[in-house]
């Protein structure tokens, strides 16, 4: 499933996102507000992306957000704690440090 906003392409995570994910997951502000596994290398970033792209258990849906002009990763957004019986879920997001202040979080959350 792909979503589009004026500035973003929002699609399931892919291995091509590894460098941007590595940078984002190691940013101190991201780690402060969105704790996740340690990400010491690109292989770990790729594994994190693969986990995010696997929606098969129905507990989450995760997307990478790419700048439509450059194709670079600017963030990620997830629905998690999905309760299909009550049709509710929680939402979380991370914004790459180079993309802050551009409305990326708002666009991701609104689109999802």
Image (tube, rainbow, N blue to C red):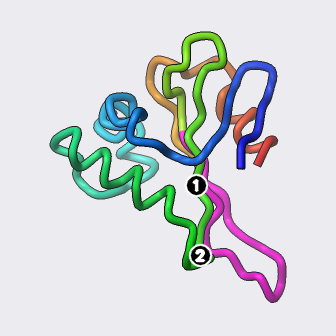
Q: Circle 2 is placed at which residue position? A: 59
How many marks can you see? 2
Between residue 42 and residue 99, name the one nearer to us.
42
Q: Is residue 88 magenta?
A: yes
Query: Residue at 66% of width from left, 18% of height from top?
Result: 68
Q: Which mark is residue 48?
A: none
Asked which secondary structure carries label 1, the reply is strand
Q: Which residues are magenta?
A: 76-92
Q: Is residue 104 magenta?
A: no
Report whether 4 appears left or right of 24.
right
Between residue 83 and residue 12, name the one nearer to us.
12
In the rendered view, tell whether residue 41 sits above or below residue 52. Answer: above
Most extreme residue toward the left, as rendered?
Answer: 40
Between residue 79 and residue 44, name the one nearer to us.
44
Query: Residue at 46% of width from left, 17% of height from top?
Result: 98
Query: Residue at 67% of width from left, 65% of height from top?
Result: 90
Report whether 89 appears left or right of 12.
right
Between residue 32 and residue 48, name the one nearer to us.
48
Q: Position of residue 56 (x, y in %)?
A: 56, 73
Quadrant of the rendered image containing residue 85? bottom right
Q: Position of residue 9 (x, y in %)?
A: 68, 30
- Circle 2 residues within 10 Å: few <14, some 14–19, many ≥20: few
- Circle 1 residues within 10 Å: few <14, some 14–19, many ≥20: many
Q: Position of residue 16 (x, y in %)?
A: 40, 33
Magenta-colored segment: predominant secondary structure:
strand
Asked which secondary structure carries label 2, the reply is loop
In the rendered view, tell whether residue 42 sits above or below residue 54. Answer: above
How far apart are the alpha carbons under marks 2 and 1?
A: 10 Å
Query: Residue at 17% of width from left, 40% of height from top?
Result: 41
Q: Circle 1 is placed at which residue position? A: 62
Most extreme residue toward the top, as rendered?
Answer: 69
Q: Position of residue 17 (x, y in %)?
A: 42, 34
């Amino acid at each position: 499933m792909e979503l589009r906003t004026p500035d973003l392409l929002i699609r399931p995570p892919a291995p091509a996102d590894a460098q941007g994910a590595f940078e984002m997951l190691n940013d101190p502000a991201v780690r402060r507000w969105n704790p996740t596994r340690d990400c010491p290398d690109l292989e770990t970033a790729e594994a994190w992306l693969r986990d995010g792209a696997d929606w098969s258990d129905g507990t989450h849906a995760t997307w990478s957000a790419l700048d439509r002009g450059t194709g670079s990763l600017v963030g990620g957004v997830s629905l998690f704690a999905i309760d299909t019986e009550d049709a509710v879920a929680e939402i979380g997001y991370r914004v790459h440090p180079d993309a802050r202040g551009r409305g990326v979080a708002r666009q991701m959350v609104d689109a999802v």
